[in-house]
Amino acid sequence: MEKKIVVILLTLISCFLFSQNKLPSISLQNLNGEKVAINSLDSNKNPIILSFWATWCMPCIKELSTINDVYEDWQDETNVELIAISVDDSRTLKRVKPMVNGKSWEYEVLLDQNQELKRAFNVITVPHTFIIYKNEIIYNHSGYTPGTEEELYDTLIKHTR
């Protein structure tokens, strides 16, 4: 009887842990107004960076601009895809597209207007960056200081080679 209880508990724990590794079933709009299902992002072959940011957040802009300078190299070396998740609300949302165009960021930019994805990832403040690879969060960092992008790059290299 005790073995059955242990087996049932292990099965339940495994199911719980597996479900936590899946991306949430949330759809966000991109800058063209198209819906993008977050759980359709495939991190099995290539890593995905999710960077939560806002137009009013200077560290966010510095981080994304710094990564943009080396992004093409990162893509060549690791096949990474960066998706910038704007958490701007209705007051600042209209600034997103002009800022992205002005900075010439080559990232996919999604709009988390209701901050649903932000809550799903337990993001308290921005910038907050995750690397997801093979359906696991392999990097989780809040804040930005110069040099943080090197830590991000080192994590990408470590897991993709």
Image (cartoon, helix red, strand yellow):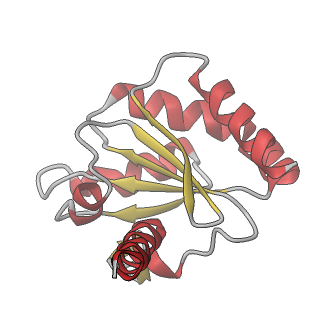
Residue at left 27%, top 55%? 118
Q: Position of residue 20 (x, y in %)?
A: 40, 66
Q: Compared with residue 153, is residue 100 higher up or lower down, i.e. above or below? A: below
Residue 24 visible at all: no
Q: Residue furthest front?
A: 1
Residue at left 42%, top 81%? 37
Residue at left 39%, top 56%? 85
Is 159 left, or right, of 103 in this rendering? right
Q: Position of residue 127 (x, y in %)?
A: 37, 36
Q: Compared with residue 42, is residue 34 higher up or lower down, i.e. above or below? A: below
Q: Position of residue 18 (x, y in %)?
A: 47, 72
Residue at left 28%, top 63%? 112
Residue 3 visible at all: yes
Decide which of 59, 155 is in the foreground and name it: 155
Decide which of 23, 52 is in the foreground and name it: 23
Quadrant in the picture for residue 12? bottom left
Q: Residue furthest left?
A: 91
